[in-house]
Image (cartoon, rainbow, N blue to C red):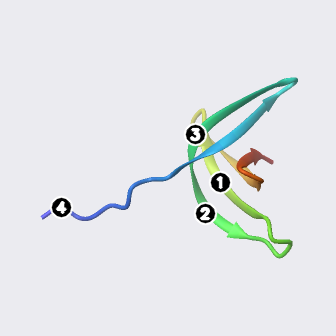
Amino acid sequence: MSKYKPRTVKHPVRLQKSDSHKIVYRTIREIQQLKNSSQIGTATINKQSVMVRKQGMYWAVV
């Protein structure tokens, strides 16, 4: 009997390099709610773990 795994939800993460915007879909882990009602978590982008913060519909790299 196989163990049930919840499906991974990928969120849109907005990357900003100089003047170009790129949106990638990544799994956000360790989501925490801060006191000032913003959410923060970690995502793996290019095999590196980066901190991301919720901004409207998207998550942005901090």
The residue tagged 1 is 42
The residue tagged 3 is 25
Q: Residue at x 79, y 65 (%)?
A: 38
Q: Marks 3 and 2, how far apart in space?
A: 16 Å
Q: Earlier in the sequence, mark 3 or mark 2?
A: 3
The residue tagged 4 is 2
Residue sticking out furthest to the bottom: 35
Q: Amino acid at mark 2?
A: Glu
Q: Earlier in the sequence, mark 3 or mark 1?
A: 3
Q: Nearer the viewer, mark 3 or mark 4?
A: 3
> Label 1's element?
strand
Q: Marks 3 and 4, how far apart in space?
A: 27 Å
Contact, mark 2 vs mark 4 (Cβ under 8 Å) = no
Q: Marks 2 and 1, how far apart in space?
A: 6 Å
The residue tagged 2 is 30
> Label 2's element?
strand
Q: Residues within 10 Å of mark 4 (few under 14, many from 20)?
A: few
Q: Nearer the viewer, mark 3 or mark 2?
A: 3
The image quadrant of residue 35 is: bottom right
Q: Residues within 10 Å of mark 1 (few under 14, many from 20)?
A: many
Q: Residue at x 87, y 24 (%)?
A: 18
Q: Nearer the viewer, mark 3 or mark 1?
A: 3
50 relative to 19 in the view: left or right? left
Q: Earlier in the sequence, mark 2 or mark 4?
A: 4
Q: Amino acid at mark 4?
A: Ser
Q: Amino acid at mark 1?
A: Thr
Q: Residue at x 32, y 61 (%)?
A: 5
> Label 4's element?
loop
Contact, mark 2 vs mark 1 (Cβ under 8 Å) = yes
The image quadrant of residue 31 is: bottom right
